[in-house]
Amino acid sequence: MNWLNRIRQDRRFSIVLTALTLSLGILIGTFITTGVTAATGQQAAPDATPITIPPVKTLTNDFVKIARQLEPSVVFITTDTKPAPRTTSRRAPQQEGEEGDQSDMFRRFFGMPFPDSQPQQRRRVGSGTGFIVDKNGYIMTNLHVVDEADVIKVKMHGDQTEFKARLIGSDIESDVAVIKIDAGKPLPAVKIANSDSVQVGDWAIAIGAPFGLEASVTAGIVSATGRDISVQQFQRFIQTDAAINPGNSGGPLVNINGEVIGVNTMIATSSGGYQGIGFALPINMAVKVYNQVIVSGRMSRGSIGVSFPKELKPEALKALGFSNGVIITDVTAGGPAEKAGLQADDILLSLNGKPIKDGDDLVARISEMPAGAEVTIGLDRGGKRLDKKVSVGDRATIFRDDPRFARRRPEMTDPGAATETTAKFGIGIQPLTEADRKDLNFTEEGGVRVTVVEEGSFAEEIGVREKDIIVSINRQAVSSFDDVKRIQATLKAGDPVAFRVMRGIAASRRGQINWTGIYLAGTLPKE
């Protein structure tokens, strides 16, 4: 048993030695830590004075007031555009003895179709700015912000609620659009200035969401007025050096009083961002568009159907013996000017007895006139003075084949948004002009053409299609947006609705559309 006692003694010795070693380590560590603490306790910069943060003191100036005043009225807009349906071509039937194509092989080995070699189209998302102009939720913005969008959403400053907006109408020539949200409460509207009073050197403040950064405020001055940098006839911009970037489009440019003087529309840049040159459409032009859109859903301008050089040197007229006027280069076929006997190379000198300064003056005065108005144009033809009576026409109709109007959107979309007392059809409509009726070979009276059918809507459910012409709802004839809205206001969820629709079928050999009448009916669902 001696060997067993010896092992026990050795084990006790090992334990005691280990305990002593740990104690010594702890003692050394404590000494080192204490030394380090003492070293760091010394002041690194004994001659430095600590900085004191002063009490909060609000500095106010005109820019601060303007920002606070307008932020609730400026909105952030996002859009979602679905990709257009892709077309596929049918393959010829596989002949006996031919090898299967790649699709057959891929399906055979992997149990799925061969991936399409064409690039997949993706949903397009955009953003921009707008500003509230009416307490009932009407918002002004640029058309290019909401153009072709399937879904338009609006957020207000300091509120994460997203409101679905509907397009009331737009004008491609001024790039102005009017949208509406139903917020369930009155909204703060901006104050409008008279942009004719804007002078070079005035303060200019831009508010918007550049690159998605909401409620950004920048300031500068008015650099120029009446800038003609666009192919569009009705865009004469206010130029400013207030920072405008992608995302600012559709936002307000305001003066030092916080009144809107323009709609921020574009920039001149070689980098894609701000370089000190921005352009805003004068608010007076935007207001003219707005006032027509809220009535008819579109902007209507008068025209006589003539073309002329955009820039004509004064020497050209002087050489012909005139100090003012417009030299006609082309007369639109079938337009008012042609019907009145005007010809290319005529020099238009007066309109209703008042001299015509130049082409811009002619267009500005004619465009203010309604279709059907009669004017007297004084002209020179080969040295002979003539007076011609011309009946003013609708500009969009006369130039409907012009590229400036080729992208014209439906004037009215989603009429009568859902509320507690009105039902939602989920369609966009467009009144039929006489030119439309002629082109479509549509001879029935009245009717509105369907331009949009909202996905998942009541209209889609009952089978309404784009290009259908609705001639009556519940046996009440319709021929305008107001007719549809009036009928819709009388309906509520659970009511039966029957649309009488004219639908175009196979065209005849002469290219004319044949129309057949059908009834589409259903019960309005609960919202």
Image (cartoon, grey):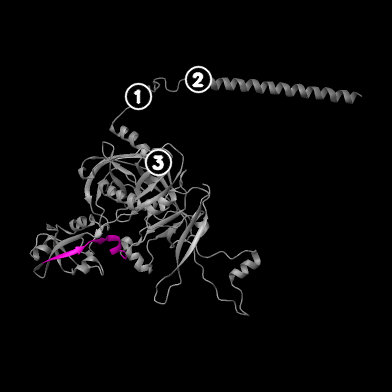
Answer with mark 2 or mark 1, whichever residue precedes in sequence.
2
Answer whether residue 396 is magenta in the image: yes
Q: Taking 35 as reference, is 409 left or right?
A: left
| Spot occupied by residue 499 in the image (x, y as percentages of width and height) | 47, 58
Dot 3 crowding, Cα within 10 Å, few <14, some 14–19, many 20+ = many
Answer with mark 3 or mark 1, whichever residue precedes in sequence.
1
Q: Which residue is mark 1?
A: 57
Q: Which residue is mark 3?
A: 214
Cα distance in 3D space between marks 3 and 1 = 25 Å
Answer with mark 2 or mark 3, whichever residue precedes in sequence.
2
Q: Are marks 2 and 3 in contact (CB under 8 Å)?
A: no
SS type, badge 1? loop
Query: In this view of the protein, which residue sits in the foreground, 374 or 149?
Result: 374
How many numbered marks are there?
A: 3
Q: Quadrant of residue 398?
A: bottom left
Q: Amino acid at mark 1?
A: Lys
The residue range painted magenta reads 386-401
Q: Quadrant of the N terminus?
A: top right
Cα distance in 3D space between marks 2 and 1 = 36 Å
Query: In this view of the protein, which residue sits in the foreground, 13 or 522?
Result: 522
